[in-house]
Amino acid sequence: MAVSQSSTGRRGVSTTLTAEVFKDVIGALRSDDNSNRVLDKRASPRVGLRTKLAVVAGPGGAFDAPPVEVWLRDLSAGGIGIVHNREMERGAPFVAHLPRRQGSALRVLYEVAHCKRLAKDLYSIGARLSRILP
């Protein structure tokens, strides 16, 4: 994995988010969940990742539309941060498709917790992990 540093000085990891990387990161973050994070108000620790991610949003949970690419910002055991060119409503579900080395993609269901406009046609979206789909 390559480590990158943005112009704001924030460090992130630039990699492809495969199902295997997802499971490794979530496992490591869960093991760190009991650490003493006095200054962090988040429910669980997160790691910055900078990569494209395929997601499918569907009205009423019908996730049969073709995937669209978004930018992954960060990942935690309980959620995900993405940047998308479309606004998403709070509570809206979407599925992240994480490729596997072999077999079909791992599909992870998320629910939008917040959506903030960054610029014209650019939104920062935070979502809670609902469940891993079969």
Image (cartoon, helix red, strand yellow):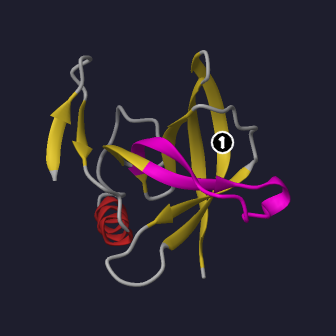
Q: Give amino acid for label 1.
A: Ala
Residue 130 at x, y percent in the picture? 63, 63
Dividing the picture into quadrants, the one containing residue 89 is top right
Q: Residue furthest left?
A: 2
| Residue 47 magenta-highlighted | no
| Residue 70 magenta-highlighted | yes
Q: Residues within 10 Å of mark 1 (few under 14, many from 20)?
A: some
Q: Which residue position is annotated with label 1?
A: 113
Q: Residue furthest right?
A: 60
Whether residue 51 is visible: yes
Q: Residue shown at 36%/70% (left/top)?
A: 23
Position of 27 with respect to 60 (left or right) is left
Q: Residue shown at 46%/35% (left/top)?
A: 41
Residue 83 at x, y percent in the picture? 51, 35
Question: Residue 128, relative to residue 48: is it above or below?
Answer: below
Dividing the picture into quadrants, the one containing residue 73 is top left
Q: Residue shown at 30%/65% (left/top)?
A: 21
Residue 2 at x, y percent in the picture? 14, 47
Position of 73 with respect to 57 (left or right) is left
Assign the C terminus to one quadrant of the image: bottom right
Residue 76 at x, y percent in the picture? 42, 52
Q: Secondary structure at mark 1?
A: strand
106 or 22, which lies in front?
106
Whether residue 44 is visible: no
